[in-house]
Amino acid sequence: MSTEAKSEVLARIRGALQDSPDAPQVRRAYRRTSGRPAAEIREMFEDRLVDYKATVHHENAATLPERIAELLGPSARYVIPEGLDRSWLPEDTIGRRVLVESRMEDAGTVLSVRDLNEVDAVVTSSTVSCAETGTIFLSGRPEEGRRAISLVPDHHICIVPAASIVELVPEALARVEPTAPITMISGPSATSDIELERVEGVHGPRRLDVILLT
């Protein structure tokens, strides 16, 4: 935008605000809390994820490592954030290698985009999930890591504690730190912008495995 065009736009804004109009009050009559049973909310969430072409698994603390091992395969090179619960992970096998990335403000390992592009998968936890929209919220917590580690690798294994699933968007946002760098995931990365043909893996992982942890 040229300087002249910018000046014109700002002048028009100042002109529109000369009489100091009051901002209209927004009516917020939408639901803020859900009355649905937890089991019904989890079923709705899973239905949305499957519709978005994510794969959903049901595990508990005892079966979780075996499931992750199965999803990774015997020789995967994968990355985890530093705060992820290590008891969730499979025991290392010959050929499988895990990279632990520290937070950027710590004096630890921060992987480059090239490094992340060369790993097979990333395993993270999540902050909260919204059943109504089938959306998983990541907010950069230690068990989730910075945004890049969940966007660059082609395969994301995301652990969603059952207690963190809510029905409504307002309920989900209430559980997220307002200043946190939020990443919202609703299925594998996909776009149909070009000639309405679905292309996966453009803006993030091509494959999303969601593990509902009870």
Image (tube, rainbow, N blue to C red):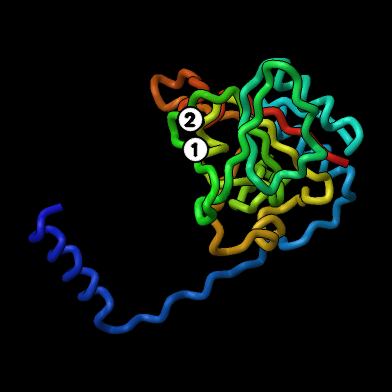
Question: Would you say 169 lies left or right of 33 here?
Answer: left
Report the residue at 50% width, 51% height from top: 104
Question: Would you say 138 lies left or right of 114 here?
Answer: right
- Of 31 and 151, nearer the camera is 151
Q: Quadrant of the C terminus?
A: top right
- Of 69 and 7, nearer the camera is 69
Q: Where residue 150 is drawn, which disc sits there?
A: none
Q: Position of residue 98 (x, y in %)?
A: 65, 30
Q: Position of residue 90 (x, y in %)?
A: 79, 28
- Helix, strand or loop under label 2: helix
Quarter assignment of residue 34: bottom right
Q: Position of residue 77 (x, y in %)?
A: 62, 23
Which residue in the rendered view is the most extreme toward the left? 4
Above or below, comparing residue 143 to residue 176 in the picture: above
Name the amino acid type tagged 2. Asp
- Of 170 and 77, nearer the camera is 77
Given contact means CB atoms under 8 Å apart, are the residues at marks 1 and 2 in contact?
Answer: yes
Report the residue at 24% width, 70% height from top: 13
Above or below, comparing residue 113 to residue 129 in the picture: above
Mark 1 Cα within 10 Å, few/some/many (few <14, many 20+)?
some
For the residues labelled 1 and 2, the Cα–Cα distance comes to 6 Å
Name the amino acid type tagged 1. Leu
Q: Position of residue 106 (x, y in %)?
A: 54, 54
Dot 1 corresponds to which residue? Answer: 111
Report the residue at 80% width, 45% height from top: 161
Quarter assignment of residue 72: top right
Q: Where residue 115 is drawn, which disc sits there?
A: 2
- Of 7 and 113, nearer the camera is 113
Above or below, comparing residue 195 to residue 208 in the picture: above
Quarter assignment of residue 35: bottom right
Report the residue at 86% width, 43% height from top: 40
- Helix, strand or loop under label 1: loop
